[in-house]
Amino acid sequence: MGNSSGHNNTLSIPPGKGPHRVGCTDLMVGHTVHGTFLRLYYPCQASENPQLPDWVPCREYFNGLADFMKMNRALSERIFNYLFGSCKIPAAWNASFKPDGKYPVIIFSHGLGAFRTLYSAICVELASQGFIVAAVEHRCLLSVGIYYRLPQTDTIVVQLLFSNSPCPAPPVSDNLEEVWMYYRPLKPGENEFPLRNKQVKQRADECIRALDILFDINSGKSVENVLQCDFDLSTMENSMDLCRIAIMGHSFGGATVIECLCKDVKFKCGVALDTWMFPLDEEIFPGVKQPIFFINSEKFQWIGNIIRMKKLDSAIFPRKMITIKGTVHQSFPDFTFLTGNWIGRLMKLKGEIDPHIALDLFNKATLAFFQCHLNMDRDFNQWDALIDGKDDNLIPGTNITIPQSSI
């Protein structure tokens, strides 16, 4: 898509470091706004000259980013296309699945104004380490999706367009009108909490539906992919370890992690990256009985948000928190790898720490946490010290000073 010559040949999303090659595909189930849309990352078989998917699937996502950042669409599209139009995800598109026992499962929830592909560095690394990762694209007007309306029946048919992507667009009938849902800002005078609380509940339901679909695929049930991609879902039958399921997310996705843990005990633990706690109703906190790992940036958090995280503390259920020095809120999405120092810091997409070091730290800490709480027989426990913040680039707990009167 876009700038085929590329903006910078040295800026790219890092590949996974694990023993498995990584493939990915898109899966859309259902023809309504209540359907499910996700990017699936998985261990794959080796192939010659694999096709790598575009990081941003099509130009309309640039419009969504422009709206979220309150930028002019025409100008921002040219800027984003120049910066990111040639970026690829280091995963083989629709590559053949690699059967190798049963893989644990992770559902990933993106942040506010993002979409399913923006955390590919994290998802690719986890898949390379032997996980099946489903990165959900949320439809709560905090991200974007494409809809086609059939005027004759007023039925909504959901499709995804790709521009110059390895996955061809499914045929679109002339009687379908393309309609996009973009990020919805708050209305003047609107009370934010009821909206955000409703959205986090919807997001959790979308994650649970995604997990239900993976259960169907694993059991051998036929699952129709609206996108009609070439990947054969039946090859994943009986390949998932559905006793070992985790939920993971960033920012609003971190709040979604907490909501999911409360709603569905099939999630055995959760990793919440720089969580925005505001959308959550504190009444659900006593119902969260699974282990939680908060991984925070140094520059984003504040007293009130940390206090809400601390309200989830338990003498019975494991709670861990670390802070990565020199990181900003956008140190978790892929933007941090795709912008140079000047632009990255101007747009607050990059912190003071090398983003590859930060990625390595929270990936290793996450893997160690998963091994412990998913009861996995792997060697990830070599990084157990990171869970407790034992590294020169980590702070145990938080860098935020909490007044004694608030504890």
Image: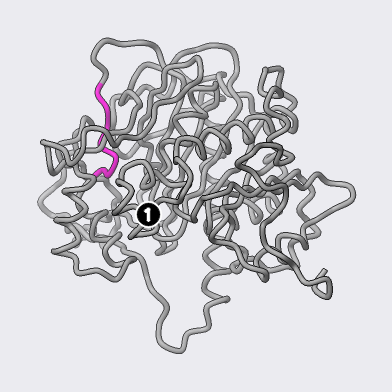
Q: Secondary structure at mark 1?
A: loop
> Vertically, is 260 above or below 372?
below
> Vertically, is 132 above or below 87?
above
Q: Is residue 379 left or right of residue 113?
A: right
- The C terminus sits in image quarter: bottom right
> Vertically, is 260 above or below 356?
below
User: Residue drawn at (13%, 64%), measured in percent from left and top?
Assistant: 74
Which color scheme is applied? one colour
User: Residue drawn at (59%, 47%), measured in percent from left and top?
Assistant: 324
First to last magenta residue range: 51-57
**Principal SS element in the magenta part?**
loop
Residue designated by label 1: 32
> Vertically, is 226 above or below 341?
above
In front: 249, or 261? 249
Residue 327: image location, x then y, percent = 51, 50
Looking at the rendered structure, the kind of residue marked 1 is: Thr
Query: In the current view of this chain or complex, which residue is farthest to the bottom?
Result: 189
Q: Is residue 405 left or right of residue 107?
A: right
Residue 207: image location, x then y, percent = 54, 47
- The N terminus sits in image quarter: top left
Q: Is residue 319 left or right of residue 15?
A: right
Residue 317: image location, x then y, percent = 83, 46
